[in-house]
Amino acid sequence: MTTASPSHQTRPVRPVRFGRPGHAPAPVTTEIDDVALVFEGGGMRGAYTAALVQVMLEAGLAFPWVGGISAGSTNTVNMVSRDLWRTREAFVGIPADPEAGGWGSFVRGRGYFNSDHIYQHTSLPDERFPFDWPAFAASTSTVRIGAFRCDTGEMVYWGAEDMESLKDLTIRCQASSSMPVLMPTVHIDGVPYLDGALGPTGGFATDAALADGYTRMLVVSTRAAGYRKPAEKRAGAYRRLFRKTPAVAQGIIARPDGYNRTVEWLEEERRAGRVYLYQPERMPIENGELRYDRVSSAYEMGLVQARRELPRILEFLGVSGSD
């Protein structure tokens, strides 16, 4: 069931960064009560799907459950905080930040993406990508952010009950997004974590949505239709590299099978009418892209597709067209 105002669309608030006059969360005009919103990760490929967040916020949509893994956690928290400005800037603004990463950052031991800087030093009101913590904390949506526990190989999902402060949120997004080899391990309460894509689904928080009782989902992928992940050819190298944490090596090696199995399940659920699988028509960038022109172009391409596809998404959600 979906509850809505007389029109599912409203004039969006002007995108203003949090902490400045005129900032306000995008208004809610349509509350969806039976569909989980799931964001796949994919590094900077998330810029393309962040454009869908903008379009859904402009349409006034609010979901009862929002979850994501890796870069999908960024789209998750921006959707929940309803921040039109940060939705774009959290991806498109990264290449303009000289401390965000690159191979120089990797050589200095900070990671190809400098996750400590990106997640711990950009989110306050006077920093580069300020986060609207009050709006996030006030949301009634169930939130799930997933990460891989390196010592046991378990998939861990955190909810609002685990995040009582902005710091609690950002460290968990950092853990969820820390790609093995390319980024340092993140410790929370002494426990080591890496990218949640190492978990059994290969990068989709669909298992968490099912565990919370949702059988209908809008799943936002960062891969085009038909994509399947090839088998890992460097299994031996990963076992040597992660000999002290063999669960990480096993997570990397098993990921293609888990990912492909999840995509096949999603395709089956789409045919059954229980899943809307949003997939880029063409993904123009890779996960490590740090060139501004390419990231911003990916976002603009995502906007074109998202606006064109919105009516079909609304139909799946059971939302009538605008008056």
Image (cartoon, rainbow, N blue to C red):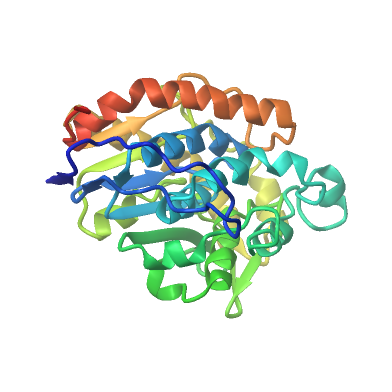
Q: Is residue 187 left or right of residue 228?
A: right
Quadrant of the drawing holding the C terminus: top left
Q: Relative to 109, is 137 above or below?
A: below
Number of numbered discs on residues: 0
Along the viewing direction, whichever of 89 and 174 lies nearer the viewer: 89
Figure quadrant of residue 47 = top right
Q: Is residue 319 visible?
A: yes
Query: Residue 188 at what x, y percent from top left?
Result: 58, 74
Query: Residue 274 at what x, y percent from top left?
Result: 19, 37
Residue closest to the far left: 1
Residue at 48%, 26% (x, y): give it: 303
Residue at 26%, 25% (x, y): give it: 312
Q: Is residue 157 visible?
A: no
Q: Relative to 203, is 313 above or below?
A: above
Q: Is residue 181 left or right of residue 306?
A: right
Query: Residue 103 at what x, y percent from top left?
Result: 83, 43
Residue at 32%, 27% (x, y): give it: 310
Q: Is residue 63 left or right of residue 127?
A: left
Query: Residue 170 at what x, y percent from top left?
Result: 58, 64
Residue closest to the far front: 21
Q: Is residue 140 left or right of residue 148?
A: left
Along the viewing direction, whichever of 212 and 312 lies nearer the viewer: 312
Q: Relative to 108, is 218 above or below?
A: above
Residue at 62%, 38% (x, y): give it: 44
Along the viewing direction, whichever of 124 and 186 lies nearer the viewer: 124
Figure quadrant of residue 108 = bottom right
